[in-house]
Amino acid sequence: MEFQKLPPVKEQIMKCVRCGKCRSVCPVFEQIRNETAAPRGHVFMVGMLRDGIVEPKQEVYEKLGNCLLCETCSVNCPSGIDIHELNAAARSYIYDKNPSAGKELIFDTMWTRPGFLRTTTMLMGGVQKLGLQTLARNMGLTKILPGDMPKAEKIMTSVPTRSARKQIPKFNRAKGEKKYTVGYFLGCATDLLNPEIAKATVNILTHFGCDVIIPKDMKCCGMPHIANGKMDTARNLMAHNVKIFNSYNLDYIISDCASCSSALAHKNVEFLLGGLKIEDEAFKFSDKVMDLTTFLVEVLDIKLPDKNVTKKTRVTYHDPCHLANAQGIKDAPRELLRRIPEVELVEMPGANTCCGGSGTYSLTHYDLSMKILDKKMDRAMSTGAAKLATCCPSCTMQLKYGTVRSHWDCEVVHPVVLANRSLQQSLVKK
Amino acid sequence: MDKAAVKNELVKMLGHEKVLSEDLDLMYYSYDSSFLTKLEPANPTAVVMPRSTEDVAQVMRFAFENDIPVIPRGAGTGETGGCIALRGGIVLDLSTWDEIIEIDASNMQVLVRPGVIHAKLNEELAKFNLFFPPDPGSSQMCTIGGMVANNASGLRAVKYGTTEQYILGLEVVLANGDIITTGGMKAKCIKNVSGLNLTKLMVGSEGVLGVVTRVRLRCWPKPRARGIAMAVFDNLDEAPAAVLDVYQAGILPSGIEILDSSAINAVNSFKPQINLPQAEAILLFEVDGNPPGVEFEGNIIKEVVGKRARTVEWSTEAKRMAELWEGRSITATAAARVKADGSRIFAGEDISVPLSKVADTLRQIRALGDKYGIKVVNYGHIGDGNVHTAPVINPENPDEVEKVLQLVDDIHRLAVELEGTTTGEHGVGAVRRQYAELEHGLAVKYMQGVKDAFDAKGIMNPGKLF
Ligand SMILES: Cc1cc2nc3c(=O)[nH]c(=O)nc-3n(C[C@H](O)[C@H](O)[C@H](O)COP(=O)(O)OP(=O)(O)OC[C@H]3O[C@@H](n4cnc5c(N)ncnc54)[C@H](O)[C@@H]3O)c2cc1C
Ligand code: SF4
Ligand code: SF4
């Protein structure tokens, strides 16, 4: 659909009364402090683009690109404006008109082809000593990291040698009585960077009565493309995944990753549809999508085996923006943690402020991202926790780096991994 | 001096960090919250983000020598285009200069730079059991500098007054670069009648006399308890009468807010679960102080207002108070709901009339809305007669824009006719200066004289106030 006719662009821009409420909550604005980085400024600039007052040029892309798409502004806007959607739509528009503004190579070729992405990441694991920079140069990916590349390399965690898919079968049968058949949307980052989350997810789901199917030919959820102005690619990915998952008879489609579940949720699918005439199929799919922790707590209502724990581990929880802001999910991950006998949950101040990671933002805006991260780490450390739990691979990568930067001996971990550890220990003792 | 030269000089003077000069960057400074700047955004020649009084003085000396307008800006939440470079010039974005220099708890005062955000200041003061009472709806966004320049107030003005009551002294950089301290160079005292009161002159001067670079504010002890009463009226006239009854019963609430039927409908269609009762008006009374005092005053309000209202509900319980208050706090936003493709606009939004004329005013505004076929939502601080009108239009429809501008003009004239004013708290800026003669007559000439004494070349925030 034409940019000017997209529903948020057409209907929402005029509703901005420029009250500035969004300025007061934006983590990027808090650092930059001038109006060019204010969410209100983004809404204004999208309006200027729409009206043809500014051209869809690289410099405009860069202004709009200085945003984590964390949605904090949108959930706080009294006029109900989806500021991040306007921003994403505008980036896509600029990209379409002016492809050199975006990051074509990495996003078009790599993320849309799971096989290629996997090989590349594995290759990266193999050549880690060689460094991301050399690798990227060899692959012609230099556009992704203007300037900040050498610093950003430090953030990339070591890549496991075997992806989750290599370790988990496509079909996993429920243990005991079967309750549901679930499709597991195994996102790229969990698959490649955090296979232990995928293993824990499948273990827990099967243990509590789910047949778990991991469709072989599913592709990326499209979130990185939305963030980098590639709306068309995101739309095609969505259509592809809809087709693949709808070909199975599933009760739920579960994702452990905050970004994936928010990309696949009804609201985002609606936003992505554009001109595609596949509403019925797409909503049939998206209405089955559920965040893993919500599924475990609210649908399966799991109870982990009781045990006497003499000394509980202090765990603090960081809200991923794509869970807390995009989907309003704050209780379920905490409740899951509370149900783990070994865990004592302690809240950090500002648990729901962004960590500054946001996919590739930490790579493209290193210095700024680090300021946001350091503030987050100070707050997390003030709890005296030994583990930092979160439900998003991008946050995980960023927070892990944060623990290194602040010399904090702390494991960054998905709640489901802790739940699975507790379960497995109980099973072994039996 | 041409634009490029101005930018170069500023960068030379202050460095790239403190100056924005790319055309694209400047566009972001073409608006504030006013409807005016939605219609006619205006870009400055350059934006400077000063971090010291000397930075400001340097810019002023340069601008003075070269006849360049200078426009102070806080967070740009003003509704009047006050911080906009209508005729080009240098915008001073003071919002990044946000140091709390000293909280002097033993003297109940605080010294701040202009960019401190109101809510953040109160967060810090709360640690000392203190607060800075004026509380604009924009508390989380607006700066102390902007509040001083606009003499801002808010919900609690009925008891605590406006910003001006709390300013002990200011540091101001004048048009020619002179730096003055008002209220005594060293004075920290609360009572002070020494000299001409330049502090009061500066407060509310909307940046046309100088740039406020430091503010000494008086703070008050933070009240320990609060209670809220919601009263529902079948007859609009009973609402202001009930307010008077409360005053006459010896009670000075910390806030008295009104929603008329248009606002009640807007809130209910925005959030049906709030489910405000259908009525001609709803009043919310807030009292604060120590717990027994609050309970005592609440009982009197219940009794006195109960004689005129259909129902009165009183609560001191946090959750219920938040529910009672929710209708009021979302009205400004909910207003847009009265029209499918509508957006509320900030224009004609701030008249103030005598208490005895509030009911009449609300009726006449609704009639004017009907006359122009424009939906309006009315709410406001009835305790001090300050009526907020929210016209709701599609701002991208030229026909509606034209009509709403006529409506707004009528509302402003109505306020003056009813022995009120065009603005109770938001200020004049660029959008209400055409009423200066009507409101002030010959006094405008003397206002201009004062302006000339401070700013002979007329470079300070031109095109504003009168
Ligand atoms: C949702 C909303 C609710 C509001 N509610 C209220 C309310 O309840 N009560 C109320 O009074 N106002 C209210 N306002 C209006 C506005 O927020 C206030 O007037 C506020 O004080 C403006 O502060 P600012 O920092 O945004 O100033 P700006 O809008 O940036 O500037 C306002 C004026 O002050 C001048 N100025 C700013 N800083 C300085 C300085 N350091 N030295 C000299 N001049 C300066 C500017 O030139 C301009 O004329 C509201 C606005 C919004 C958007
Ligand atoms: S909070 Fe919403 S209405 Fe207010 S300035 Fe931001 S986008 Fe506009
Ligand atoms: S999405 Fe987050 S980073 Fe982007 S403008 Fe909104 S609050 Fe700021």
Image (cartoon, rainbow, N blue to C red):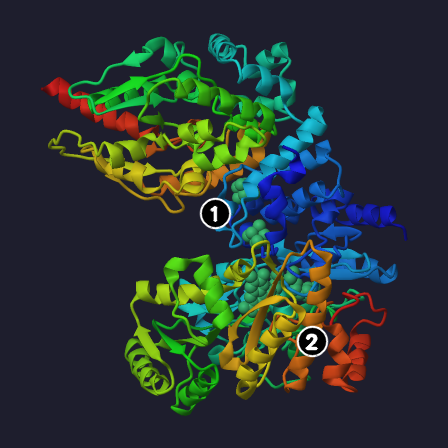
Above or below for B17 versus B422? above
- Residue drawn at (16%, 21%) of the image: A177
Residue type (three-letter) at the residue carrying disc 2? Asp
Identify which amino acid the numbered label 1 is placed on: Val
In the image, B4 versus A282, the foreground residue is A282
- State the mark number for residue A169: none
| A350 vs A180: above or below | below
In the displayed structure image, the side of residue B172 where residue B119 appears, left or right: left
Whether residue B114 is visible: no
Q: Position of residue A181 (x, y in %)?
A: 28, 22
User: Eyeballing the image, is A131 above or below A40?
Assistant: above
**Are callouts 1 and 2 both on one chain?**
no
Q: Quadrant of the C terminus of chain A?
A: top left
**Pointer 2 residue:** B410
Quadrant assignment, res A336: top left
Q: Identify the element where label 1 is drawn.
A: helix
